[in-house]
């Protein structure tokens, strides 16, 4: 038996890497809630932006201090974007208490190296699910083919590489056999899947959509330029279990700012929104915006505000720009003062708060299917779940109670109350 304590920081793609690593160690892996109880302590780090770097460093240093003096001492392994961004040698010098550093560019070696350090036999493919039983992330690709001027991902995770469709279908079957109802496809650019294999995303979806037991298939991280008419036609014909929820990181609305960002659809982001809604008039759209990018003027920001007001996105994430070392944007002239960036973030989020409240209020009185994720931590009989337009971990939730409501169940419920970002339902 191997007792494991893990922390997975950052995005769902990191979560999948952690689950695959732990699952590869065999069926006798047991997760524990305290690091001192573990044989292996694993931290999967994020280093996409400076606050994530700082959080990851704190987590690693604090864990090393907590483990100091324990007998026997757990193996401390650290992987992910922190080693990918700063390199193994530098980190080994800075934090020698870490027993094993694992580079994000060499994911295939992680199971073998960890198994060897634990003195276990050869690892085998597997996955130790941490989200179940209602949903699971399915990471379909690694790295990124784009070179946005603000982004560190290509330098950390490398170029775009698609996972084989057959292997992904096998992984999906195993997840569904374990009772998972919703699969959420993730990658740095999901629409780019297959381009390096002479295929496209439709080939993979042909494998996944017919799988028995699949109630929902959700696509995240859809790069705007990849949402062409052919893909949207395919999705419109597919029907359930595909969920008409489109997570499209637009980042801005003004062509001048988009051009400086290095986004390839800089001319007209409205065309992307219109194209989706022409195929899916009732689609739920989620996007992210960066405010305060170098050179963003008051006029540029007002264009963004107007775009969001017209767009009526179900969900919107807003980030105040941060200059990341080594990116072209960090060296640009006309850096916007921090106080202006933060004020613009607050203004855009205030606008979106009203939009979200209005959209959700229109669901009051409707009967919707709720996928139940987990019991509420404080109220017996109350559970958190999600309706079709709520993705796990990034959107609001639906609080649901009533007959048949239990983890992993898909129940029909009446929406009785709408809040700013959440719903309340009775089954």
Image (spheres, grey):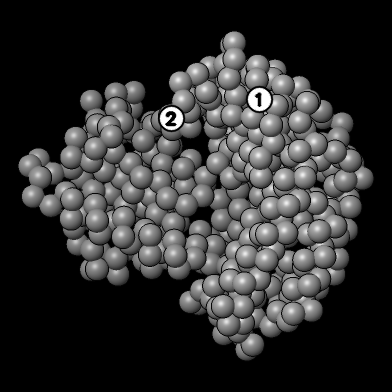
The CA distance from mark 2 to mark 1 is 17 Å
Q: Quadrant of the N terminus?
A: top left
Q: Position of residue 385 (x, y in %)?
A: 59, 29
SS under mark 1? strand
Please identify the residue farthest to the top as the structure is shown: 403
Q: How many marks?
A: 2
Which of 212/417 is in front? 417
Residue 146: mark: none
Q: Position of residue 76 (x, y in %)?
A: 23, 48
Which of 392/4 is in front? 392
Name the quadrant containing residue 311.
bottom right
Q: Residue at x 29, y 23 (%)?
A: 28
Up-down relation of residue 351 to residue 381 (above or below): below
Q: Which residue is mark 1?
A: 425
Up-down relation of residue 33 to residue 199 (above or below): above
Q: Quadrant of the C terminus?
A: top right
Badge 1: how crowded within 10 Å, few (<14), some, or many (20+)?
many
Do the residues under discs 2 and 1 have CB atoms within 8 angstroms? no
Q: Residue at x 74, y 80 (%)?
A: 298
> Which label's residue is closer to the chain start, 2 or 1?
2
Q: Which residue is mark 2?
A: 377
Please identify the residue farthest to the bottom as the structure is shown: 333
SS under mark 2? loop
Up-down relation of residue 35 to residue 215 (above or below): below
Q: Residue at x 45, y 21 (%)?
A: 380
């Amino acid at each position: 038996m191997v007792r494991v304590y893990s922390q997975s920081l950052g995005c769902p793609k990191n979560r999948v890497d952690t689950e695959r690593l732990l699952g590869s160690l065999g069926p006798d892996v047991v997760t524990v809630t305290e690091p001192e109880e573990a044989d292996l302590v694993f931290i999967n780090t994020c280093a996409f932006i400076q606050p994530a770097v700082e959080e990851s460093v704190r987590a690693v240093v604090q864990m090393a201090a907590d483990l100091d003096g324990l007998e026997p001492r757990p193996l401390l392994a650290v992987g992910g974007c922190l080693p990918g961004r700063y390199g193994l040698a530098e980190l080994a010098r800075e934090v020698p208490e870490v027993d094993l550093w694992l580079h994000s560019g060499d994911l295939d070696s992680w199971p073998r190296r960890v198994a060897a350090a634990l003195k276990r036999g050869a690892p085998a493919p597997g996955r130790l699910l941490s989200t179940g039983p209602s949903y699971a992330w399915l990471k379909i690709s690694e790295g990124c083919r784009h070179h946005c001027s603000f982004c560190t991902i290509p330098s950390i995770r490398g170029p775009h590489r698609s996972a084989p469709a057959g292997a992904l279908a096998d992984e999906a079957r195993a997840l569904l056999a374990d009772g998972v109802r919703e699969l959420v496809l993730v990658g740095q650019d999901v629409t780019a899947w297959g381009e390096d294999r002479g295929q496209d995303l439709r080939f993979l979806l042909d494998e996944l959509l017919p799988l028995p037991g699949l109630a929902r298939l959700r696509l995240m991280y859809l790069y705007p330029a990849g949402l062409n008419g052919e893909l949207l036609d395919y999705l419109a014909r597919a029907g359930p279990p595909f969920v008409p929820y489109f997570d499209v990181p637009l980042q801005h609305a003004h062509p001048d700012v988009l051009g400086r960002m290095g986004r390839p659809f800089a001319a007209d982001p409205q065309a992307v929104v219109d194209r989706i809604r022409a195929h899916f008039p009732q689609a739920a759209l989620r996007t992210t915006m960066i405010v305060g990018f170098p050179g963003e003027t008051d006029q540029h920001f007002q264009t963004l505000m107007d775009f969001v007001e017209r767009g009526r996105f179900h969900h919107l994430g807003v980030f105040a720009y941060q200059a990341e070392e080594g990116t072209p944007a960090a060296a640009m002239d006309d850096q916007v003062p921090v106080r202006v960036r933060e004020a613009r973030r607050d203004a855009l989020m205030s606008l979106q708060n009203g939009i979200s409240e209005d959209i959700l209020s229109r669901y009051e009185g409707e009967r919707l299917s709720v996928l139940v994720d987990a019991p509420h931590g404080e109220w017996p009989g109350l559970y958190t779940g999600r309706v079709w337009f709520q993705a796990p971990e990034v959107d609001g939730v639906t609080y649901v109670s009533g007959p048949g409501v239990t983890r992993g169940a898909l129940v029909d419920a009446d929406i009785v109350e709408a809040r700013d970002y959440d719903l309340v339902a009775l089954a």
